[in-house]
Image (cartoon, rainbow, N blue to C red):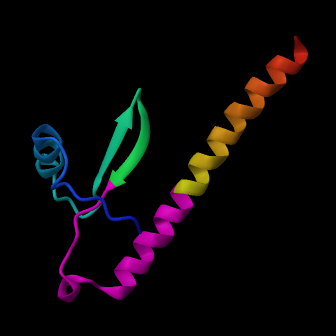
């Protein structure tokens, strides 16, 4: 996992990140109505439940696979439209 330091970011970026809700499911950032990132709060190791974490990881994987299929379908439709021209 890549770590990005907020210490070197503009104050507006820091405030935005710190303003995100600390929901267990995290926050999904969207651009143009499409999800581009999910931000999850970091929990103390003592708070982590291994089974709950594993379930969340598997659910996220399944969600990502679904989104990838949707994007592939859109790409295929675009490509087919170009080929038909």
Relative to the observer, which residue lies in front, 34 or 7?
7
Q: Residue furthest top?
A: 85
Image spot of residue 82 (x, y percent):
82, 18
Residue 7 drawn in magenta: no
Residue depicted at x 15% and y 55%: 7
Residue depicted at x 29% and y 85%: 49
Q: Quadrant of the C terminus?
A: top right
Residue depicted at x 18% and y 81%: 44
Instruction: Tell me where the magenta segment starts and ends, as one range.
Output: 39-63
Left or right of 73? Residue 84 is right
Secondary structure that dominates the magenta span: helix
Relative to the observer, which residue lies in front, 6 or 55?
6
Q: Quadrant of the N terminus?
A: bottom left
Residue depicted at x 12% and y 38%: 12
Relative to the observer, which residue lies in front, 21 or 42?
42
Does residue 5 sit above or below 16 in this rendering?
Answer: below
Image spot of residue 61 (x, y percent):
53, 64
């Amino acid at each position: 996992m890549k770590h990005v330091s907020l210490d070197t970011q503009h104050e507006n970026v820091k405030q935005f990140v710190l303003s995100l809700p600390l929901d267990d499911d995290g926050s999904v950032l969207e651009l143009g109505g499409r999800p581009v990132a999910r931000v999850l709060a970091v929990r103390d190791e003592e708070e982590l439940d291994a089974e709950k974490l594993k379930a969340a990881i598997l659910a996220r994987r399944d969600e990502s696979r679904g989104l990838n299929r949707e994007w592939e379908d859109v790409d295929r439709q675009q490509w087919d439209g170009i080929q038909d021209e």
